[in-house]
Amino acid sequence: MQYTIHHQEAEAKGAFFVDKSGQRIAEMTYSRTNAAMVIIDHTEVDESLRGEGVGRQLLDALVAWARETGTKVLPLCPFAKAQFGKDASIRDVLV
């Protein structure tokens, strides 16, 4: 199932997330190190969404945003790091 992914950034922190009734039920967070680079630090998906590919949808949204804005990405989050390891087509945004 395809979910609507929202993006929010304030100061040096940001997140791509899925919202349901005002609650974040899935999110991928990042920290901005400078104007051109972010570190993906955490991915969390609610149990009710496990196995639906929501984590990957969050990552795909982040990668699309990184490409549009010229932002480089350093994945420290184990999930994001594993996804970059498996899929060469998204590695263009890596530091």
Image (cartoon, grey):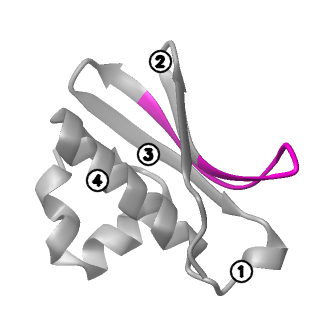
**Residue type for callout 1:** Arg
Is the C-beta separation of discs 2 and 4 under 8 Å? Answer: no
Q: Nearer the viewer, mark 3 or mark 4?
A: 4
Measured in 3D between alpha carbons, the distance from the residue under mark 1 to the one under mark 2, in whole angstroms, is 29 Å
Q: Where residue 90 appears, x then y in whole percent?
A: 21, 66
Residue that badge 1 annotates: 50
Residue at image x 57%, y 50%? 42
Q: CA distance from mark 1 to mark 4?
A: 23 Å
Measured along the vertical axis of the image, is residue 64 above or below residue 32?
below
Which numbered tag is attached to residue 40? 3
Inter-mark Cα distance, 3 to 4: 14 Å
User: Is tag 3's residue or tag 4's residue first in the polypeptide sequence?
Assistant: 3
Q: Return the residue nearer the eye: 21 or 66.
A: 21
Marks 1 and 2 in Cβ contact (< 8 Å): no
User: Label 2 sits on what residue type?
Assistant: Ala
Vertical order, 38 against 73 (above or below)? above
- Tell me which segment is drawn in magenta: 17-31
Main SS of residues in magenta: strand
Report whether 3 appears left or right of 91: right
What residue is rendered at 30% in x and 54% in y? 63
At 74% from the left and 76% from the top, the residue drawn is: 49
Residue 3: percent from left, percent from top:
60, 67
Secondary structure state at the residue bearing disc 4: helix
Q: Judge the density around disc 3: few (<14), some (14-19), many (≥20) Cα neighbours within 10 Å.
A: many
Dot 1 surroundings within 10 Å: few (below 14), some, or many (20 or more)? few
N-term mark: 3 or 2: 2
Q: Which mark is residue 64?
A: 4
Magenta-drawn stretch contains 95: no
Between marks 1 and 3, how big is the CA–CA gap?
20 Å
Report the residue marked by disc 2. 12
Amino acid carrying mark 3 in the image: Ile
Location of residue 18 by image quarter: bottom right
